[in-house]
Structures are given as structure tokens and as C-alpha cells.
């Protein structure tokens, strides 16, 4: 089987006893950077005796067959440099191929920069979307935020310290300066800090050139209140495609948080 193991994102004390035990017992380990793994093992007091395989974005496709041939009969531990493998880190292609071949995949959970930043952001956590690293080019970055302009869920992004100001400026331009957000840097480390405020306020803060690994969290868009009368046309449009009136009313009412009974009666009146 494949065993996906989360490693510390900063503080070594966050390494779980399961991770330490797994590192010491593993016969085969696929690591994003074998040198980083060896350093981590040394800091944790773990003596590695596993055969090590590098698994990074440039060679993952080429490693799949070799690693899965082993995983078919043995356990292969998969780790990234920090956090959970596959989450903006190598491993997804390997896991997908393992699933397709019927090879078991399990996990040793642990630190996550995504969840940590979301938890301390002060923004809604009941529904969220992880968008990975923000596009580097200005045009692509602008397009990204245009596509997310009406996203109602809280959004989480990874960004580098030397691009965070430009990203915040673009986000403020597209999403609006008053949109709430937070920037967390150096999570779990000595100089951990989370700055919260509007995008406009965070632009001002980021002009001081913050350092460290950064996670940006932006509040989702709030739905504007729509009067039921304005939705009658949307319902009748669905009905014209063959949908039953009650089903069409239920769908439109749920999307816009209005009363189904009120909207249903308005639609009946409009058809008379």
C-alpha cells in the first residue's frame, strides 16, 4: 500500500508519534526531496534504513510504475517537504494511479498549512475552497480573481512573500477593497503572525514586505438579497425546458434563499 504521511510545516514538535514510528520502520520512502527528509529524520532522532526515492513535480510521472510495483506487495511511505503530500505537493498522480490499479492508500494525518491558516483567519470555515498557488503573471492573476468573484465559500491560497503585495492589490481591485481577508506567515514557527482586515488594509500592511511562507485567506462573496418577484422569469425559463413547476421553484428558491411557497404562488399568478 501507499502511506501518505504529513510532516511538520514548521515546528518539529508537531511531528506525530505515528510519523516518527513510520519513518523508522519504513523499507521504502518516496520523498519530495531526499536531502530534506534526511535532515528532518536527523532532527527527529530517527535513523532511516529505507530505500529512498525522490518524488517531485519534475519526475512524478516517471516514478509511478516503479513505486507502484513495490507498493503492490510492500508498504511505500510518501512524504513531502512540509505538510500533507498531494496538497500543492507531489503525490496526486501517484495516488490516482494506485487507486486505478486497486492498490490500497492510507494516511498518517498531521500538520496542514491550509487548515491552520483557515482556522486562525476569523473567516467562515463551514465551507471553503483551496486554490493552491496564485498565478505569477499579472494577467493570469487577474483572470483567477475574476473567476472567483462570485465564489461564496472562503478561499485559501498559497503565495510567496515577494508577490503577496501584487496579489493583494489585484484581489482588492477585482473583489473589492472591503472584502475581508487574512494573511498568515511562518505558521507554527517562532515568528508566526496573522494579519486580518479588509483587502485594502492588507495591501497597506504588505507594503512593509513581509517575510516567510504565506497563506492568504479571503472571504467568499455574499449573496445580494433578491426579491421573489425578480425570480419568476428564472423559474419560467426552467419550466420551458421541460422541468416541473414545483421542481423549478425549489431549485431557484434554494439558490437565492427565498420562500418556496411565495415564489410558487407568484409563478402561478404569472401563468394566469
Image (spheres, rainbow, N blue to C red):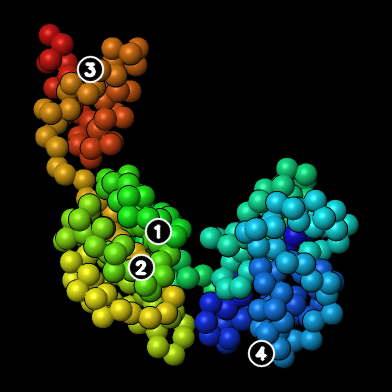
Q: Earlier in the sequence, mark 1 or mark 2?
A: 1
SS for dot 3:
helix
Residue 124: x and y in percent read: 31, 61
Q: Label 2: how many residues lie within 10 Å, few (<14), some (14-19) or many (20+)?
A: some
Q: Looking at the rendered structure, which numbered label has been put on residue 136? A: 1
Q: Looking at the rendered structure, which numbered label has been put on residue 171? A: none
Residue 111: x and y in percent read: 54, 73
Contact, CB < 8 Å: mark 1 with mark 2?
Answer: yes
Residue 152 seen in the figure: no
Q: CA distance from mark 4 to mark 2?
A: 31 Å
SS for dot 2:
loop
Q: Nearer the viewer, mark 3 or mark 2?
A: 2
The correct choice, above or below, for 10 with respect to 3 in the image is: below
Q: Earlier in the sequence, mark 4 or mark 1?
A: 4
SS for dot 4:
helix
Residue occupying the point 11% across, 34% down: 227
**179 left or right of 41?**
left
The correct choice, above or below, for 221 with respect to 75 in the image is: above
Residue corresponding to mark 4: 43
Q: Earlier in the sequence, mark 4 or mark 2?
A: 4
Q: Label 1: how many residues lie within 10 Å, few (<14), some (14-19) or many (20+)?
A: few
Residue occupying the point 66% across, 83% down: 40
Q: CA distance from mark 1 to mark 3?
A: 44 Å
Q: Looking at the rendered structure, which numbered label has been put on residue 163? A: 2
Residue corresponding to mark 3: 236
Q: Earlier in the sequence, mark 1 or mark 3?
A: 1
Q: Label 3: how many residues lie within 10 Å, few (<14), some (14-19) or many (20+)?
A: many
SS for dot 1:
loop
Q: Label 4: how many residues lie within 10 Å, few (<14), some (14-19) or many (20+)?
A: few
Amino acid at each position: 500500500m501507499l502511506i501518505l504521511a504529513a510532516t511538520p510545516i514548521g515546528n518539529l514538535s508537531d511531528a506525530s508519534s505515528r510519523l516518527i514510528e513510520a519513518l523508522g520502520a519504513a523499507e521504502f520512502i518516496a520523498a519530495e526531496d531526499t536531502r530534506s527528509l534526511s535532515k528532518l529524520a536527523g532532527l527527529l532522532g530517527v535513523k532511516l534504513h529505507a530505500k529512498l526515492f525522490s518524488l517531485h513535480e519534475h519526475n512524478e510521472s516517471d516514478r509511478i510504475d516503479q513505486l507502484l510495483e513495490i507498493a503492490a506487495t510492500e508498504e511505500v511511505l510518501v512524504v513531502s517537504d512540509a505538510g500533507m503530500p498531494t496538497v500543492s505537493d507531489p503525490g496526486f498522480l501517484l495516488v490516482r494511479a494506485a487507486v486505478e490499479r486497486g492498490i490500497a492508500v492510507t494516511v498518517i494525518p498531521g500538520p496542514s498549512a491550509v487548515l491552520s491558516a483557515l482556522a486562525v483567519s476569523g473567516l467562515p470555515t463551514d465551507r471553503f475552497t483551496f486554490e493552491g498557488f496564485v498565478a505569477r503573471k499579472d494577467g493570469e492573476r487577474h483572470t483567477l480573481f475574476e473567476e472567483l468573484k462570485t465564489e461564496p465559500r472562503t478561499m485559501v491560497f498559497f503565495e510567496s512573500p515577494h508577490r503577496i503585495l501584487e496579489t493583494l492589490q489585484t484581489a482588492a481591485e477585482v473583489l473589492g477593497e472591503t472584502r475581508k481577508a487574512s494573511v498568515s506567515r511562518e505558521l507554527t514557527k517562532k515568528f508566526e503572525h496573522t494579519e486580518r482586515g479588509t483587502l485594502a488594509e492588507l495591501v497597506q500592511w504588505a507594503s512593509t514586505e513581509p517575510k516567510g511562507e504565506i497563506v492568504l485567506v479571503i472571504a467568499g462573496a455574499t449573496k445580494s438579497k433578491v426579491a421573489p418577484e425578480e425570480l419568476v422569469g428564472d423559474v419560467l425559463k426552467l419550466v420551458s425546458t421541460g422541468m416541473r413547476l414545483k421542481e423549478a421553484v425549489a431549485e431557484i428558491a434554494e439558490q437565492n434563499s427565498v420562500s418556496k411557497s411565495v415564489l410558487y404562488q407568484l409563478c402561478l399568478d404569472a401563468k394566469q
